[in-house]
Every structure is written in C-alpha cells, then in structure tokens.
Image (cartoon, helix red, strand yellow):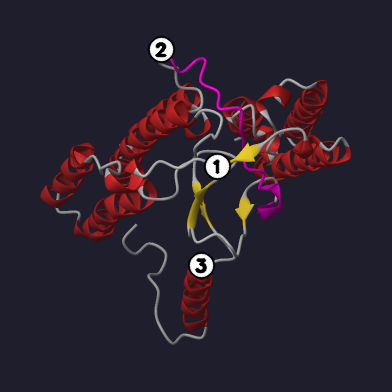
C-alpha cells in the first residue's frame, strides 16, 4: 500500500474548497454581507483569485508530500486530513481581507438596509416528507430479518431521531433577501424541501453502509453505496446553492427589487461566517453563511444549557460515573 491512496481525498477536498465561492450567494462572498451592486466589485474578485491561488498551492504541496512519502501512508494520510484545517484558514483569511476592504471603503454606508419576513413559514411550515424515510425503514426491516440485532437499536434510533431533527430545522428562521422577498421566500421553501429529503435519504444510506460493512464480502459494495449518495448530494448542492439561491427564478422574479439591501449583521458572525453569536437575537438555530447547514446562536441561553449538559455528560463519563457505549457496541 502506498501514499497515493490519499490522492482521492486530496482531490475531493480541493474540489470542495474551490467550489465554495460558487455555492455561496453573490451578496455574501466569503461570509461577508455586501450589496448586490458590489457583488462583482474588483476588490471581491481579487480576494476570490487570492483564495483560489492559495487553495491550488495547498493542493500542490499535498501532492508533493504524497509523492515524497510514497511508502509512508500514515504521513500522507495525516497531511491529507490536515487539508481541511488548511482550507479553513485560507477561507478565514479571505473573510478577514474582505471585511477590511468593506470597512476601509465604507461599503455599509452606501445603501438602505432592511429585513423581510414571511409568516407562512410559521403558519404553513415545510412538512417532514415521511415517505422519503421508507428506504431507511426497509433497510431496518431487512436488518431485523437477517438477525443482526446488534445493529437494530442504533439504526432504529437514527431512523426515529432524524425526522425530529428535520422538523426542528424546517422551523428555524428562514434565510430571506430584503431585495427580493417573494423570490427568495419561494426558493428557500424549495431548498428546505430538498434538504429534508436528502437528510432522510442519508439515513437509508448510512444504515445500508453499516449493514454491508459488517457483512463479510460486501465491504466494497458499501463503499459504492456511500460514494453514490455523496455524488448525489454534491450534485444537489451545486444545483440549489446556499439556501437555494442558485434555483431558477420564475417569471416576474427576475426584475424583483425593493431597493433594500439585507441587514448587515457581520459583527455577529465569527470564524469566517461559521459561528454566530447575538444576544439580542431570540433565534436558537440560524442557517450558516457558509455551506448548507445550521448552527446554534452561541449567545442564546438555550445554547448555553445544551452545551453545559453535554459538558456534564462528558465529565460524568470521564470520571466513570456513567458508562457510554464502547467501541464496537452497536456500530
């Protein structure tokens, strides 16, 4: 076995890093809020080019390490995984550079800012598409018929808990654009429907991969299943974009413009737009500015309670007061 087995991971991570600027809305480049008229500003283009160059350099260095450490799989593997942290640093540098430009040129004083809301997300929220959980239930029943009871409980737990998580996320504060309230609301609702379906399909994929991985002779098939799901997930992400901003606009939405720019709340976002903290915000869950996921409002008392409970659980387990499942149990 050679270090070249790390090349697929390096290729995947580099591809994702290069795609991130394309997946985020043009009004939130590198997690920084800008007006639509600034989306193609030369300064933003320079920051994007610098980001792309740094990612490419990191990829070349990773490739050289794999070639030099040809017989050392561990070294190559560690460096390949370190690319995640390296890409994070590169992104954070781009965020910091763009924030500095925005502050120096006083972009935030050029436009009228506002917010929009859509109460239908409360009165008529996106429903959990329970039928899309059917594949996961089928895998669970097949596991029971095969007598793999060591896998049934964790599979059942995931099958039951994921719809609950989906329901919570569907009721989080929507990501809307004050400049295009009608179009952004429709696209975000479509995005939520797709997100819910992908999350429920993920349960089936994970359950099936676990079953196949623990079944002698089917390990390769499990890799094919997970690869197929990940490819489908990436294709879907590219199609919809962050919060659905890449979805096609319907007739009448192309010219929608209220003259407002979405409220500038950069001061509440940290670590390149991945960490949110706002004491005045009553929302517990907010959508990330980067990627297609949600994050907790780190300044909310509910978040403090959850983190304190988690810390207490870890402490009790560390001191042997409670027993957590050991490696190999269940999964």
Check residue 12 for magenta coloring: no
Q: Where does label 2 land, which residue?
A: 251
Image height of 290 relative to 318, above or below = above
Q: Are marks 1 and 3 in contact (CB under 8 Å)?
A: no
In front here: 286 or 319?
A: 286
Residue ID for mark 3: 303
Q: Is residue 163 left or right of residue 113?
A: left
Q: Position of residue 110 (x, y in %)?
A: 77, 33
Q: Position of residue 9 (x, y in %)?
A: 59, 33
Tag nearer the camera, 2 or 3: 2
Q: Is residue 160 left or right of residue 7?
A: left
Marks 2/3: CA–CA distance: 41 Å
Give coordinates of residue 239: x percent, y percent.
46, 22
SS category of the residue bearing label 1: loop
* Bounds of the magenta segment: 251-270
Looking at this view, name the residue that lies furthest to the left. 145
**CA gap, disc 2 to disc 1?**
24 Å
**Residue under circle 1?**
115
Dot 1: few (<14), some (14–19), or many (≥20) neighbours within 10 Å?
some
Which corner quadrant of the image does residue 109 belong to?
top right
Tell me the quarter of the image containing the C terminus: bottom left
Please identify the dominant SS of the magenta region: loop
The residue under the point 49% across, 44% down is: 293
Q: Locate residue 134 relative to residue 182 in the image: left or right.
A: left
């Amino acid at each position: 076995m050679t270090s070249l087995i790390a090349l697929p991971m390096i290729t995947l991570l580099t591809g994702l890093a290069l795609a991130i600027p394309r997946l985020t809305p043009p009004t939130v480049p590198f997690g920084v809020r800008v007006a639509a008229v600034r989306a193609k500003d030369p300064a933003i283009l320079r920051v994007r080019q610098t980001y792309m160059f740094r990612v490419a350099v990191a990829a070349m260095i990773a490739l050289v390490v794999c070639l030099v450490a040809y017989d050392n799989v561990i070294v190559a593997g560690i460096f390949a995984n370190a690319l995640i942290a390296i890409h994070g640093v590169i992104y954070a540098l781009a965020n910091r550079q763009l924030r500095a430009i925005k502050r120096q040129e006083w972009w935030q004083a050029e436009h009228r800012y506002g917010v929009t809301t859509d109460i239908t997300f409360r009165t008529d929220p996106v429903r959990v598409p329970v039928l899309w959980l059917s594949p996961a239930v089928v895998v669970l029943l097949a596991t029971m018929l095969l007598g793999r009871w060591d896998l049934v409980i964790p599979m059942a737990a995931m099958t039951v808990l994921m719809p609950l998580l989906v329901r919570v996320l569907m009721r989080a504060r929507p990501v809307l654009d004050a400049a295009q309230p009608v179009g952004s609301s429709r696209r975000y609702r479509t995005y939520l429907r797709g997100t819910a379906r992908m999350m429920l399909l993920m349960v089936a994929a994970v359950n099936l991969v676990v079953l196949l991985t623990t079944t002698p002779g089917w390990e390769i098939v499990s890799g094919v299943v997970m690869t197929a799901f990940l490819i489908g997930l990436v294709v879907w992400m590219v199609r919809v974009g962050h919060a659905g901003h890449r979805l096609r606009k319907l007739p009448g939405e192309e010219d929608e413009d209220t003259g407002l720019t979405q409220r500038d709340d950069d001061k509440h976002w940290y670590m390149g737009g991945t960490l949110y903290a706002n004491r005045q915000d009553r929302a517990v869950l907010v959508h990330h500015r980067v990627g297609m996921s949600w994050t907790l409002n780190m300044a909310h008392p509910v978040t403090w309670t959850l983190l304190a409970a988690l810390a207490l659980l870890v402490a009790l387990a560390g001191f042997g007061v409670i027993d957590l499942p050991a490696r190999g149990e269940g999964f």
